[in-house]
Amino acid sequence: MTGSSGIDQIRALLAQVLEQKERSVFQRLREWYLDAAHKRGDQRRDLEVSTCLGPLLRWIILRWAAQERRLALALDASTLADRWTVLSISVLIRGCAIPVAWKVIGAHAKGSWRPYWEGLLERLQGSVPADWEVLGLADRGLYARWLYTAIVACGWHPFLRINLAVKARAVGEEAFDWISRWVPAPGTRVARRGGVFCPAEEPTVLHVADAVGSGL
């Protein structure tokens, strides 16, 4: 309603709607994201942040340029010192990344990240209009068949950076072979229609390979 996420504008609006003092509304907004144990009052509860992720993405899309029906979402894992690892999905725009979904875990936590990534993608599923073109980008450290499948399940196109230890086949080929045959040296580029994961009876997809250093 305010067209902004700034706390000053939000508190001014809510103070008028609720007929309360701005100072009281401001304090409640500051406590809103805290754990229930750190909030004042006897009937406080935790905020389930994951319920806000889809609405956050939809809010960004509402303010998107009307003629621009394309979106790029970056999946990234960032480590904060040796304490935390932040798994995030961000909207890429004008050289910036706006986080719209995230999960913070211990830097040395054991176990697979797969459930976290699938959960974040599931929270965002359906938040982008079906007729939009959406790219799901990820670096080669996140490359996996299950991630490819999860992005496709959202109706989006995977744009995953891969390494040399991957097999693929071009249209018309029967067997899979190492993708390095197409990019034998750093700096080599090739655009070819083929498949990495899809079985023979499924439609092929377009992959662009760019050999830089030791990866694609």
Image (cartoon, rainbow, N blue to C red):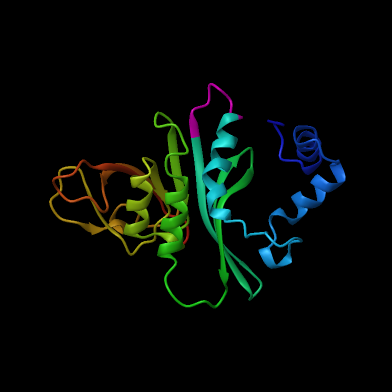
Picture quarter with the C terminus = bottom left
Q: Magenta segment: does it hold 109?
A: no
Q: Main secondary structure of the magenta part?
A: loop
The location of residue 206, given as percent across then percent down, is: 31, 41
Give the quadrant of residue 38.
bottom right
Pick the residue in front: 22 or 90. 22
Q: Nearer the viewer, residue 35 or 21?
A: 21
Q: Position of residue 5 (x, y in %)?
A: 71, 40
Residue lying at 37% horizontally and 56% vertically, measured from the top left: 147
Identify the residue at horizontal 71%, vertical 62% (top origin). Answer: 42
In the picture as drawn, the residue positioned furthest to the top comes out as 67
Q: Is residue 46 visible?
A: yes
Residue 65 lies in the magenta-colored region: yes
Q: Is residue 44 left or right of residue 52?
A: right
- In the image shown, does 99 or 138 lie closer to the viewer? 99
Instruction: Answer with left or right where residue 103 lies relative to residue 81.
Output: left
Q: Quick check: 184 above or below 82?
A: above
Residue 115 vs 130, above or below: the answer is below
Total numbered labels: 0
Q: Is residue 38 left or right of residue 78?
A: right
Q: Residue at x 57, y 74 (%)?
A: 107
Q: Quadrant of the N terminus?
A: top right
Magenta region, residue range: 63-70
- Image coordinates for residue 132, horizontal then vertical, percent: 43, 31
